[in-house]
Amino acid sequence: MLSIKYANQNHSTRIHESEGVVYLTFRNLEQAGVLHGFSTRLGGVSQGDLSTMNLSFHRGDDPEAVMENHQRFAQAVGYDERKLVFSDQVHTTKIYKVTEADCGKGITRESDIISIDGLVTDRPGIPLITFFADCVPLFFYDPVGKVVALAHSGWRGTVAKIGKVMLDYMKQEYHTQAKDVLCAIGPSICQDCYEISGDVAEEFQKEFTEAQYKDFMRSVGSGKYHLDLWKVNQYILLEAGITKEHLETTDICTCCNPDLLFSHRASQGKRGNLGAVIML
């Protein structure tokens, strides 16, 4: 029986199982009919610290096992893994506009998508994927302009407000209005599990109001703090124009659920990568 520790009881994150592959979705995106999913550790073929559903080719895994994992995850969620477009995450706020010419980059052919933490497209049938093991996945769907996007938001991306950067990019390239966008903050590390140093806390203090800072940052003594990445990203997205009724926030922490999800903190770096996927 699947045992999950929930951070709260908002139940925005939904659990699905298909042929042994367990994955997660969000209520608002499901209701809008947009294909999306967030993988778990369950249902793949990888071994050891990478068991079983590692989706990264850069964690020392057998490439054939990774490919099999992608095939299983794709079948469960409902997209063609051969058309996947991979991000190349380095904790920046750079966004890449995906077209049909990019299909397969990262999985079936070499990719020239370098140093990119956000992917966006208005082309149907192209699955976008970004990778995680504690950092925050941000899902975007513009139902008016028919645009989907994903962003990888660790602490550096969060303090640089990648969520706002993505919305600005979508407006510039596709005339997206933030008030129309459905957004989800995906499974990632919760505040109780995420301890940071004073220098990182100072970066957030510079970029946010005093009231906001006190709301998402908690001192635990000895120059250490607990940071609530979920709450920071809520502030960023709401201030950028996302409406409260269009925003879902996860209730599942990666670090609290190491048997279900890969967590860099919980495993001390001995782990695979989870994947966030979205497609028109």
Image (tube, rainbow, N blue to C red):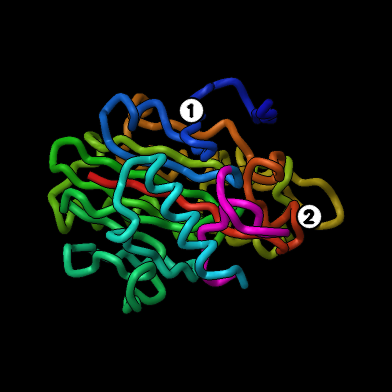
Residue 233 percent across, percent down from the top left: 48, 44
Q: Most prominent secondary structure in the magenta stretch?
A: loop
Q: Which residues are magenta?
A: 43-59
Q: Quadrant of the N terminus?
A: top right
* Residue 47 highlighted magenta (yes or no): yes
In the rendered structure, the answer to whether residue 218 lies left or right of residue 143 reads right
- The residue pinned by badge 2 equals 224
- Quarter residue 103 falls in: bottom left
In this rendering, does residue 126 appear at all?
yes
Looking at numbered disc 1 in the image, what kind of residue is underneath it? Arg
Q: Residue at x 27, y 46 (%)?
A: 279
Q: Which label lies toward us, 2 or 1? A: 1
Classify 248 as above or below 189: above
Mark 2 closeness class: few <14, some 14–19, many ≥20 residues within 10 Å: some
**Residue 66, label in figure:** none
Rendered residue at 32%/31% (across/down): 243
Q: Residues within 10 Å of mark 1 (few under 14, many from 20)?
A: some
Residue 227 belongs to the span the image colors magenta:
no
- Identify the element where label 1 is drawn: strand
| Numbered tag placed on residue 14 in the rendering | 1
Picture coordinates of residue 24, whole percent (x, y) = 49, 36
The amino acid at mark 2 is Lys
- Above or below residue 123? Residue 237 is above
Q: Tell me how far mark 2 sits from mark 1, CA to CA.
A: 33 Å
N-term mark: 2 or 1: 1
Residue 27 in which image quadrant: top left
Where disc 2 sits, the SS reads: strand
For the point 73% across and 45% down, the residue is: 193
Q: Is residue 11 left or right of residue 175?
A: right
60 or 221, nearer to the observer? 60
